[in-house]
């Protein structure tokens, strides 16, 4: 389900999702009350909304779903990228926080991640969380995170999102071989052996934050 006060935004998202395997838009709304009625009526698996919808916040939809134990999971699609907003969203029960700088491939990846039961953050936001944990004494693995270089944090955040070494290299303008070196080093420091463990590490990190 799509919730946004701007019709052009809903149209763009609808066109993006059109034809995507396993995804169907079952409803749209431009404000909170209509959105809540649609959620109660259609029970969508996922609601894509912004941080701001009319005079309220998209986070209200996540809080509503949490309070009523609904299966609906909320994806925030926004330009707002400050750490405080991301933290509030996670605490409100948001399943994914995707920046509007994301391309179509990332948006679909985020939706499929949410449908599988995971949380998702755009890669730059994952780096913010890692940096925050490096500065927080109460972090569960502060020593390991503190050992990571900035480049290693960037690479494992992208790897956790499912990007290959080649795709990461293209995005960071380095060779796949260099990516593999940084990735292996970071995984070793964190005590992780495969991508499944890496994804679980990020999921637990996001939930704790």
Image (cartoon, rainbow, N blue to C red):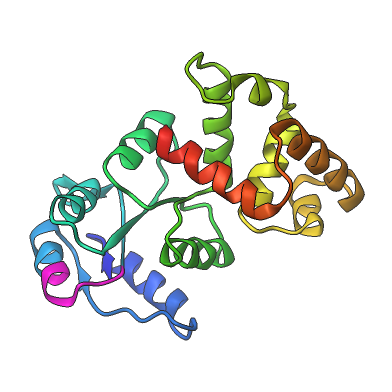
Which residue corresponds to the image point at 74% horizontal and 51% vertical from the top-left?
A: 171
| Residue 48 on image: x %, y % | 33, 62
To which quarter of the image does residue 30 belong?
Answer: bottom left
Indicate whether 15 appears above or below 159: below
Which residue corresponds to the image point at 71% horizontal and 36% vertical from the top-left?
A: 191
| Along the viewing direction, whichever of 140 and 16 lies nearer the viewer | 140
Horizontal relation, residue 89 to residue 54: left or right:
right
Q: Quadrant of the N terminus?
A: bottom left
Indicate whether 168 appears above or below 48: above
Q: Which residues are magenta?
A: 38-45
| Residue 4 on image: x %, y % | 26, 61
Horizontal relation, residue 52 to residue 124: left or right:
left
Which residue corresponds to the image point at 65% horizontal and 19% vertical from the top-left?
A: 143
| Residue 123 on image: x %, y % | 58, 45
| Along the viewing direction, whichever of 6 and 184 lies nearer the viewer | 184
Indicate whether 130 appears above or below 90: above
Which residue corresponds to the image point at 72% horizontal and 22% vertical from the top-left?
A: 147
Give yes or no for residue 40 being in the magenta stretch.
yes
Horizontal relation, residue 71 to residue 190: left or right:
left
| Residue 199 on image: x %, y % | 59, 50
């Amino acid at each position: 389900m799509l919730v946004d006060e701007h019709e052009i935004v809903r149209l763009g998202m609808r066109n993006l999702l059109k034809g995507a395997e396993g995804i169907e838009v079952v409803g749209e709304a431009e404000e909170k009350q209509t959105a809540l009625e649609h959620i109660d009526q259609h029970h969508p698996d996922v609601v894509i909304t912004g941080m701001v919808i009319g005079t309220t916040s998209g986070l209200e939809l996540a809080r509503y779903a949490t309070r009523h134990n609904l299966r609906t999971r909320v994806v925030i699609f926004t330009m707002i990228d400050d750490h405080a907003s991301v933290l509030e969203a996670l605490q409100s029960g948001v399943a994914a926080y995707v920046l509007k700088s994301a391309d179509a491939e990332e948006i679909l990846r985020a939706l499929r991640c949410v449908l599988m039961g995971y949380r998702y953050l755009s890669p730059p936001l994952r780096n913010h969380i890692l940096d925050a944990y490096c500065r927080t004494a109460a972090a569960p693995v502060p020593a390991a995170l503190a050992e990571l270089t900035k480049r290693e944090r960037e690479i494992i955040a992208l790897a956790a999102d499912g990007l290959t070494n080649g795709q990461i290299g293209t995005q960071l303008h380095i060779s796949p071989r260099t990516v593999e070196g940084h990735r292996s080093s970071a995984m070793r420091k964190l005590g992780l052996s495969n991508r499944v463990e890496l994804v679980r590490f990020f999921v637990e990190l996001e939930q704790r934050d």
